[in-house]
Structures are given as C-alpha cells and as structure tokens.
Image: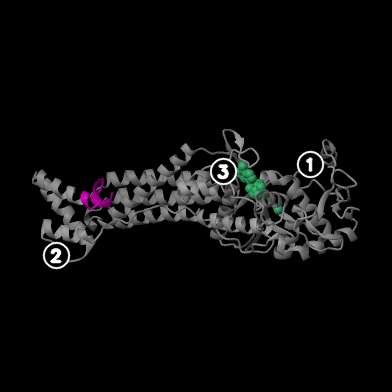
C-alpha cells in the first residue's frame, strides 16, 4: 500500500485511486521564456520518480503536464530581444523538452500548450460568468470573484480574511475586490491575443491548468502536483475555478515539493542565484544529478552545491565499481564444490532485505532517500562479500546482487554507469599473440590469456615480463586492475 502526504490535509493517507488500478495525475509545467533552472528540475524530477514508482507498483498512470507558452514573462523577454513572443516560446518549449529528456525524465502522456487551448478556456470562463463566479470588467479583463467561492482557501489552508491583509489592486486592474484574480486579460498593443466574447485578449495563468485538467483527465483527478511555491495562489485559484465551474472535487491528493536552495536561499530567476539544468548537465552526468537530488526527500528543502554534486558523482562510480566487480566475480565463479555457501547465503539475504526496504521506503510517501540508503548498504555488503569469498564466489549470488542494484537504481531513473567487464580493442589479440602465442580473434579470450601470462610471470617472479605486459597494455590505453577477486583489464 502506498501512503502519500496530501498537503491539503497535511497528513499521510493511504493512496486509493478513483478508478481501480489507474492514476490520473497533473503536474504544472514551466513558463517557457528561458532555460529552466535546477530548482525547477528538482520539482519535475520528484514527480517523474513518483510516476515511475506508481507504474512500477502496477498502476496505469496517465500523466499530463502543460507548457505555459503565453505569459507576461515571455512577452517581456520577446520585447527585450526584439523577437516575436511565439518564437521565444517555441525556442524554450523545445529547449525544455530536450533538457528533460537529457535528465531522463519521462515525456508526459499529454502535453497541452496554453496557446492551443484557448477555446476550452473561453468556454470555462463563460460558464463561470453565467454561474455568478466571474465578471467582465469594463477594460475587457475577466475576473474570478473569490468571495463567490465559499470553499476558497481549501488547497492552501488560507482564510479569506487573512488574505485581505496586503491585498491591493494594481493600477492597470479593474477588479471589484482586491482578492479577485484575472481569468482573461484584455490585449495590449503588440501582445499575442485571441478573439473572445470580451474582446481581444489572452488567458490568465491560473486559467489554463484548470481547463486542461478538465479536458484531458476529467475532474476529480487523483494527484495534482507542483512546487510548494505554487500552492498559493496558483493551485488555490485553479481549484476555485474548477470546483465552481464543474461542481466536482478537483484533485484528491495535492503534492508539493520542497525548494532547492543555494546558500540557504531558494533558487530563483529573480534572485539571480540559479544554474540552468543545461549548464549543469553540460558538465555533470544526469545520473549523478538525479542521485544527488533523490538523496533528499521530495518535501524537504534541498541544498545544492557543486561539491555535493561531485560527491554524488563519486558515489555513483563506487556503485558502478561494485557492480563491475560482482559481474567479473560471477564470470569467474568458483566450481560448485569450492563455493563459499555461507557467504553466498548471507549475500542473498542482504539482497532480499535491501529490496524489501527499498519498497517500504518508496511506499512511504516516496522516500527516495531511505530507498537509496538501503542500496548503499547493499553495496557495502557486496564489497565485503567479494573480499571474504574471493576465490569461492557463487556465480548466481554475485549476479543476482549486481542485477538487484542496477534494477533498483533503474526504477529511480538512475543508470548505473557500468563499464563492460572486458571491453578491449582489436590490438589486444595481436598483443596477446605476441606475448603468449595466443591464436584466435576472441578479445575476451585474449584478455584472459594476457592476464594468465602476467599471473604466471609474477608467480615465477619474472617481474620484467610482468611489467612488460602491463606497459604494453598501458600503451593501448588499458590498465590492469587487481581486484579482490583477481586481476582484470580495463580501459584507462
Ligand atoms: P515556473 O516556471 O516558475 O512555474 O516553475 C516551474 C516549477 O518549478 C514549479 O512547479 C515551481 O514550483 C518549481 N520551482 C521553482 N523554483 C523552484 C526551486 N527553487 N526549487 C524547487 N522547485 C522550484
Ligand atoms: Zn498549474
């Protein structure tokens, strides 16, 4: 049973989807006026992993995410650069999709764009006006009448009277109440706009998600997500529109992610303390960045630094080495009667325990930090096994452990960067032939022959010959690595 923290009720509850075996989820997408930063990426990664775990748990998940491709920020950026707003939106929509794929985030099943959903948004606004929840102002704006929704505040837990403090009407607005928000904005000269019953204009930001959720998933949905900074006003306003328009609940479970911070401060475009996902992935691997982020629970704040990212890079290399050593040891497993059965049984038990713990942690509100800790523990157990059972390795146990590690990280979308055990260039066969009269073209066999020759030379204390083999390998860009379970050849 999966338990999820529902931020609307502020507690963990058993997850019970509306339709058995199916999950409908929506996660607000980016406003496409620039490259996204790694704070944004943290939120999208969190929901990618949540989605992956729901799928791994047997649910059929339908995942929708919008692109906000018309907005003040896009229009401002376009004006700054002397470009059309559509062109800026297209550039950064494409960039967003490309960077998400590079970060191994699954494409949504449905990716609606605001500019393609004007009709459904106008229909929703019309209905809200007819039902007395919205009004058209003289300047061509349409506003949602917040006080007409008796449940307003239900998502974020805020009270209308508290909201009044500090609420004010901006100069260019024409609302009846400072709390009201724009569903439709009258066009200003030079801005992208669409015809509507209230004149040329464009939708407000909160309008699009409500209309898209209803159109593509149907309300209520099971899970609605986004960064914690979206709970108010964005999600509150989405919910108000949808519930007032269609008289059904909007989302059964609200999930909000903690903020990524640098030096204790929220990463944001406006503070200027940001790194784009693109620049970070240009220098560091996607699996390492995923690992770093997933080592913190999705609801907790996450402190980012390049030192921590390098730390994750090292952890990943350590995991990869353990897997390589397990595979190598399995390939050189002992004969049945020479296997250390007790050590193998201990390793098998550690694999089962890690798997159970991983599942329990993921089922507990997607605690990736706990799930990863279980597998870091298994990696330590595996290294101990390789050392203690060297020469008496149980092929099956070693292989199963390697597969379990790779599989667990894969569930989190982290590819363990394992190099192939014996991955050598053709020159090796020639070298082997020269040094040990090896004949044939099987590279793996050549590597074995070379290692044998080196082992024999060392056993005979023929250091010159052993060194010669090592030096010739080095010239080919290869190194001999002496592992707990014997020597092997790898690319340098
Ligand atoms: P935006 O394009 O500003 O709507 O942001 C896209 C998503 O990123 C939203 O879900 C935001 O809540 C989220 N977000 C923005 N800044 C951060 C941050 N520093 N850490 C985590 N998520 C963030
Ligand atoms: Zn939204």
Task: Tell me the SS state at disc 1.
Answer: loop
Q: Nearer the viewer, residue 187 or 406?
A: 187
Residue 114 visible within the image: yes
Q: Tell me the CA gap for discs 1 and 3.
A: 25 Å
Picture layout, residue 91 above or below residue 236: below
Picture layout, residue 208 above or below residue 304: below
Which residue, given by chain and number where applicable, does mark 1 sit on? 158
Given this view, does label 3 or label 2 mark the residue nearer the observer? Answer: 2
In the current view of this chain or complex, which residue is farthest to the front?
82
Which residue, given by chain and number where applicable, does mark 2 sit on? 439
Region of the chain picked out in magenta, as a range: 474-492
Residue contact at pointers 1 and 2, CB within 8 angstroms: no
Q: How many marks?
A: 3
Dot 1, how many residues are within 10 Å of its Cα: few (below 14), some (14-19), or many (20+)?
some
Q: Is residue 480 magenta?
A: yes
Which quadrant holds residue 27?
Answer: bottom right
Residue 5 marker: none
Q: Tell me the CA gap for discs 1 and 2.
A: 79 Å
- The mark that comes first in sequence, 1 or 3, is 1
Dot 2, how many residues are within 10 Å of its Cα: few (below 14), some (14-19), or many (20+)?
some
4 horizontally vs 449: left or right: right
Which residue, given by chain and number where applicable, does mark 3 sit on? 297
């Amino acid at each position: 049973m999966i338990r999820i923290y529902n931020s609307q009720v502020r507690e963990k509850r058993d997850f019970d989807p509306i339709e058995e075996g199916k999950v409908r989820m929506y996660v607000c997408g980016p406003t496409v006026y620039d490259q996204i930063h790694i704070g944004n990426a943290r939120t999208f990664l969190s929901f990618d992993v949540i989605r992956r775990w729901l799928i791994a748990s047997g649910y059929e998940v339908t995942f929708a995410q919008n692109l906000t491709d018309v907005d003040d920020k896009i229009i401002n950026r376009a004006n700054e650069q002397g470009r059309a707003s559509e062109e800026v939106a297209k550039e950064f929509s494409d960039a967003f999709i490309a960077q998400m794929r590079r970060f191994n985030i699954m494409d949504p099943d449905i990716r609606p764009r605001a500019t393609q959903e004007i009709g459904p948004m106008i229909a929703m606004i019309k209905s809200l006006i007819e039902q007395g929840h919205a009004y058209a102002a003289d300047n061509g704006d349409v506003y949602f009448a917040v006080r007409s929704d008796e449940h307003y505040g239900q998502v974020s837990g805020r009270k209308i009277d508290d909201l009044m403090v500090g609420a004010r009407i901006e100069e260019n607005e024409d609302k009846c109440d400072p709390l009201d928000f724009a569903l439709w904005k009258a066009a200003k000269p030079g801005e992208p706009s669409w015809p509507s019953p209230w004149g040329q204009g464009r939708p407000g930001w909160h309008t699009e998600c409500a209309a898209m959720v209803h159109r593509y998933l149907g309300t209520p949905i099971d899970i609605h997500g986004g960064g914690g900074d979206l709970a108010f006003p964005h999600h509150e306003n989405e919910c108000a529109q949808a519930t007032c328009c269609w008289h059904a609940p909007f989302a059964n479970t609200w999930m909000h992610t903690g903020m990524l911070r640098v030096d204790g401060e929220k990463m944001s475009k406006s503070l200027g303390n940001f790194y784009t996902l693109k620049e970070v992935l240009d220098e560091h691997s996607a699996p390492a960045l995923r690992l770093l982020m997933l080592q913190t629970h999705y609801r907790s704040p996450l402190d980012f630094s390049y030192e921590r990212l390098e730390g994750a890079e090292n952890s990943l290399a350590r995991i990869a080495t353990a897997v390589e050593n397990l595979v190598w040891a399995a390939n050189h497993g002992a004969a049945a009667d020479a296997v250390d059965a007790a050590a193998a049984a201990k390793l098998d038990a550690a694999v089962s325990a890690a798997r159970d713990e991983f599942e329990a942690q993921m089922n507990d509100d997607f605690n990736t930090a706990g799930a990863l800790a279980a597998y870091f523990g298994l990696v330590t157990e595996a290294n101990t096994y390789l050392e203690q059972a060297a020469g008496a390795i149980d092929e099956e146990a070693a292989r199963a452990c390697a597969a379990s590690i790779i599989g667990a990280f894969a569930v989190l979308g982290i590819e363990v960067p394992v190099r192939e055990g014996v991955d050598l260039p053709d020159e090796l066969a020639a070298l082997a032939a020269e040094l040990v009269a090896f004949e044939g073209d099987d590279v793996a066999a050549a590597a074995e022959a070379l290692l044998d020759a080196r082992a024999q030379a060392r056993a005979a204390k023929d250091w010159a010959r052993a060194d010669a083999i090592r030096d010739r390998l080095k010239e080919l860009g290869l190194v001999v690595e002496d592992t707990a379970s014997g020597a092997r050849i790898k690319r340098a």
